[in-house]
C-alpha cells in the first residue's frame, strides 16, 4: 500500500474509533440507523403521497436498505419494540410480510438523537476555518464520486470474469 493510501485509511480508522454514537445514550448505533432508515422511508413515502398516514417499511426492505441481514434487523427491532420506539405489523393480505412503523416515542427519540449529533457537528464545524471546511467538503465529495465509480467498474470486471468461467 503506498504512503498516501496508508495515511487515508489510517484517518478513516481514526474516525471510526471516535464512536460518535456514544453521545446517544438511549439507543445503540444500529438502533439509531434503523430509526433513521424508517424515518427516511416515511419521509419519501409522504412526499409521493402526503395524505397517506402510517407509512410502513417491510423488514426485508429495511435490511436491504441498511445492507445487513434480516435476522440482524429483527434482533435490533426487538430491542426497539421493547423501548416502544417501533411497532411491527403483519400484513393481513400476506402473513409472510412484516412491516415496521415508528411510534410517536420513536420519532421523538430519533429527533432528540439527531439534535445531539447536529449540536456536536456544529460545534466541530465552528472550530474550523470556513474555507478549509468548504475545501474538505469538496474533496470528500470528489473522493466519494471517484470511489463509487471505481467500485462499479471493478464490480463489472468481476461479473465479466465470472460469466466467462
Image (cartoon, rainbow, N blue to C red):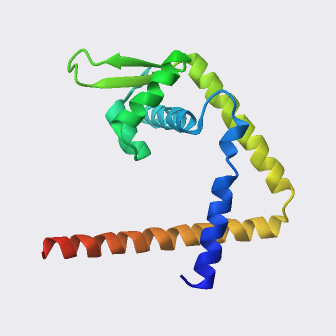
Image check: 135 left or right of 67? right
Q: Residue furthest bottom?
A: 2
Number of numbered discs on residues: 0
Quadrant for residue 129, please give it: bottom right
Give the image quarter of residue 60: top left
Please name whichever residue, 54 or 37, is drawn nearer the observer in this view of the structure: 37
42 to 53, vertically: above or below: below
Left or right placement of residue 42 versus residue 91 in this view: right
Could you say which is closer to the camera, residue 48 or residue 6? 6
Residue 107, above or below 29: above
Point 45% across, 22% down: residue = 78
Residue at 40% across / 47% down in the picture? 67
Q: Is residue 90 found left or right of 140 in the rendered image? A: left
Q: Residue at x 22, y 24 (%)?
A: 96
Residue 16 visible in the snapshot? yes
Which is nearer the eye, 87 or 7?
7
Confirm whether residue 51 shows in the render: no
Locate residue 48, reporting x and y percent: 41, 35
Residue 88: x %, y % from top left: 40, 19
Residue 135's spot in the image, x, y percent? 72, 71
User: How far across and how far down the image is residue 145, in percent?
Assistant: 51, 69
User: Is 162 rendered above or below residue 76?
Assistant: below
Q: Which of the image's four quarters has the C terminus?
A: bottom left
Residue drawn at x 45%, y 26% as measured from the top left: 77
Identify the image quadrant of residue 26. top right
Amino acid at each position: 500500500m503506498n504512503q498516501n493510501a496508508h495515511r487515508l485509511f489510517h484517518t478513516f480508522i481514526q474516525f471510526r474509533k471516535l464512536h460518535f454514537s456514544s453521545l446517544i445514550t438511549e439507543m445503540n448505533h444500529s438502533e439509531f440507523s434503523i430509526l433513521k432508515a424508517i424515518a427516511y422511508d416515511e419521509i419519501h413515502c409522504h412526499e409521493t403521497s402526503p395524505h397517506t398516514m402510517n407509512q410502513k417499511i417491510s423488514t426485508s426492505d429495511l435490511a436491504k436498505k441498511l445492507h445487513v441481514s434480516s435476522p440482524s434487523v429483527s434482533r435490533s427491532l426487538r430491542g426497539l419494540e421493547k423501548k416502544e420506539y417501533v411497532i411491527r405489523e403483519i400484513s393481513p393480505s400476506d402473513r409472510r410480510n412484516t412491516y415496521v412503523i415508528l411510534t410517536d416515542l420513536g420519532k421523538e427519540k430519533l429527533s432528540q438523537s439527531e439534535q445531539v449529533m447536529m449540536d456536536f457537528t456544529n460545534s466541530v464545524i465552528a472550530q474550523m476555518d470556513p474555507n478549509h471546511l468548504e475545501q474538505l467538503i469538496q474533496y470528500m465529495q470528489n473522493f466519494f464520486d471517484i470511489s463509487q465509480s471505481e467500485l462499479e467498474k471493478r464490480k463489472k470486471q468481476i461479473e465479466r470474469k465470472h460469466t466467462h468461467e
